[in-house]
Amino acid sequence: MRSAKGEDGYTFAAHDTAAAVVDGTGTLVAWTSAAERMVARPAEEVCGHPVAELLADPARLGEVLAQRPSGPEPWEGRAVLRHGSGGEVEVGFRVLPLGRAAACGVSGYLVVGAPGEQITRLRQDHALAVGLFQQNRFGLAVFDTGLRLVRTNTPLLPYTGIPADLRGHRLGDFLWARDAEALDERLAQVIATGDPLLGFTTPARTLHDPRSGVILRVSAFRLQEPDGRCLGVAATFSDVTAEHRIHERIEVLHRATSVLGGSLSAQATSEDLAGALVPSLADAIAVDVTEPVFTGGEPVPDRRERLALRRTAVAGEGTAALRTPGTVHTGAVPTSPSRPGRGVLVPDLGLLGEEGAGGGTGPGPPDWSTAVPGTRSAISVPMCAGNTLLGNLMLWRTAPTRPAFEKGDLHLLEEIAARAALALDNVRRYTREHLAAVSLQRSLLPPATADTAAVRTASVYLPADPIGGVSGDWYDVIPLSSARVALVVGDVVGHGLRATASMARLRTAVRTLADLDPDPDELLTHLDDLVLQLPLGAPEPAGAQQPVGAEQPGVPTLPGPGLSGDSSAQSGPDTFAATCLYAVYDPVSGRCSMASAGHPPPAVVDADGTVTFVAMNPGPPLGVGGLPFEKSVIDVTPGGVLALYTDGLIERGEGDVDEGMEQLQKRLVQTDALHRPLHDVAREIVAGLPPTRLPDDVTLLVARTRRVPERDTATWALEADPAVVARARELVMRQLTAWELDLLSFTTELVVSELVTNAIRHAGGPIELRMIRTDVLTCEVSDPSSTQPRMRRARDTDEGGRGLYLVAQLTTRWGSRYTRGGKTIWAEQALPPML
């Protein structure tokens, strides 16, 4: 049994509580309508009767009265009453002595009661409410309909700046305006709609100290009377600051990891990292990378542990005071004295020098921590891959409403810096390999411009992979005998070092075959046979090096030299595909002969500006074999332009070759290729290509043709008679005098004598002698024999065999070539300097 002293009347605060008055003799004298409804017995039936008759068992009245404590105080109990329907009902009751009401003519007891189940539920509701307001693990607040605080428990926002008595206050009286408005808006929705608010997370920063704010998780529900009238709203608050910051740090780590390794540029990697950390983690950031990362070298500090650092990225507020990106400076990276090689935390510029507070290094703030105006907290973390220092991260918080950096932030930054260092180490290693690969490729391609007696050329080469910078397209300008020149463009399918190596072998083979000076169709036939014999498509060697960290979880595999996503890069050793266009231009005749192995035809810009494509019948690509190649011959006007290219220029990734050729034709007209510098013309033609990665390599070779004037050539037909040797010498001497080349008379006379004598002795007639004056003096002797001369070293007892040896010693170069009617032996001499 429990006493009912004081304000314990809460038990019968239920709606429609029954009441009765019992006099001093135990007789019922009053009976309310609520009591009638509770036991279904009218007042006429019970008033004037002993109260014991209300009991289901009147004999148990003593047990009911035994619940009364000693003394005149009110008391409570339980009894089983007889219901008017014949059944029973358990009720809880409370007895209130009416001793003080005797002066008013009333005496006895006032008895109030309600069904037992309702009493039990009311007791539970009361215990629940009291228990909630006594909790100290979460906050509880009751607001009226005007969102003014009515009641709170002790833990509600136990932070600096909260009034001791919150009754009657609104949240905006002590919380930062934006935080208060956000919470008021949600609570107002609960009052208006009745829908509960579950798990709403919001910052709560006080007006007194906004930096020490917390993150609250709020749930709320509407309070209302039994008749539905709204009384206000009740809300629970949980401090989830630690959980929220852990979640934020995980998101920052995930965001930073996702951007790292996506680029093989130190600049882009730094900028991506800065964008991932500002403003999510800091208000300002500066990223420094050691200078050797950009050159592929090893960062080595000097004796004072100083390194050459390049400022690669800055972001956030106040960064105008920092060095601009690209600036190189020398300095030592800040590290913690208690943890060498680890980060330094300045949690508060007013609380430095406390090791437990984050590793401050003295009573005064470090220079780097105050580099950004308005700094309140700062972190510096080195980026180390193993024992190699690759850079440094510096972060600042300046916003007055932002909390200072904590040790958890320092540990997070150290993890991010370690991953960033791995990405930068990949960049450094790749840069070293990339520079080697680019150097290899540049050594395998000729200069971008060339100037010969036959043509002036300019070229542009754009690889499909601008990062790798190596591929299988190539071009060449090969000087031939008799002032002629060979223009070559080829395309090896695929990308990477393997395609580059195949290209180099093909280019070398073309140059070797060109030295024999066959016709274009014959050269392609020999080249096709060579391709069929050589394993040009050999796969990458096993264990080819990949960038460090490619197998690390969360770090994507990076492309690098020799690594290609092209399907051809994974082909077997017996697969190879290449196209080639070989053209020979003769500046004496103005004719150009050419043949194609699966390559698109060149464009020709005539002297009147008309642009046409050469009508050709291309043969199959190299390596197919079994089919002949067909030669095409055209006349090129002096000053005309030839444009040779690979399919990457005309396909543009869409496969419409006709449209691409039409666009090339228009660009050759628009760029005024006949009169402008060829280098500018070539650059403008490819200027319309997309700036991003190309679908295929693009190679363009433009050549402006020249003609050798008739006055600079001389041709004589000779009979196969030893007597004509003297006449040949006379003709040559006379022509040299006309050309003012008397200084070359002796050597030229000897060379012509030997070549004509050999032709008469070994080939017969007719014989043709020709001299060409360009930047060199060329002497040619043609005969009908197809037997190639062979130079040998004559013995002391031999009477002959020294002719070609003398020719080789007296000229800069010599050789022979087959012709349709036999062969031609030629020799070149450098012109004497002009006086």
Image: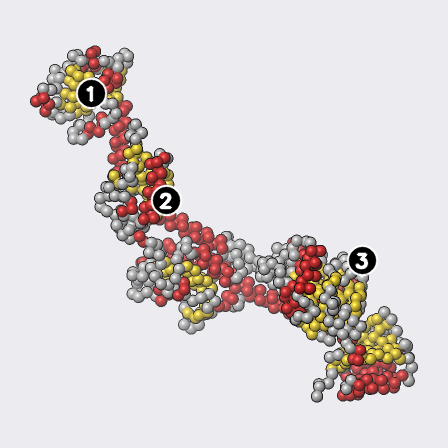
Q: What kind of residue is marked 1?
A: Ala
- Image quarter of the C terminus: bottom right
- Please name the residue shown 16% across and 21% down the image: 110
Asked which secondary structure carries label 2, the reply is strand
- Image quarter of the N terminus: top left
Q: Give the x, y percent position of residue 474.
A: 68, 65
Asked which secondary structure carries label 3, the reply is loop
User: Does 444 appear above or below 766?
Assistant: above
Total marks placed:
3
Q: Nearer the viewer, mark 2 or mark 3?
A: 2
In the figure, residue 127 lies in which quadrant?
top left
Q: What distance separates the C-alpha of mark 3 from that of mark 1?
A: 119 Å
Q: Give the x, y percent position of residue 549.
A: 52, 57
Residue beneath label 1, please?
Answer: 19
Residue beneath label 3, please?
Answer: 626
Q: Earlier in the sequence, mark 2 or mark 3?
A: 2
Asked which secondary structure carries label 1, the reply is strand
Query: Badge 3: few (under 14), some or many (20 or more) residues near its Cα, within 10 Å?
Result: few
> Looking at this view, is 792 or 223 the one in front?
223
Q: What kind of residue is marked 3?
A: Gly
In the figure, residue 607 lies in which quadrant?
bottom right
- Please name the residue shown 76% across and 62% down the image: 614
Q: Is residue 492 visible?
A: no
- Please name the residue shown 18% across and 13% down the image: 47
> Looking at this view, is 338 or 467 the one in front?
467
Residue beneath label 2, please?
Answer: 201
Q: Residue furthest front?
A: 608
Q: What distance separates the C-alpha of mark 1 from that of mark 2?
A: 49 Å
Q: Are marks 2 and 3 in contact (CB under 8 Å)?
A: no
Q: What distance separates the C-alpha of mark 2 from that of mark 3?
A: 77 Å
> Looking at this view, is 304 or 403 the one in front?
403
Q: Earlier in the sequence, mark 3 or mark 1?
A: 1
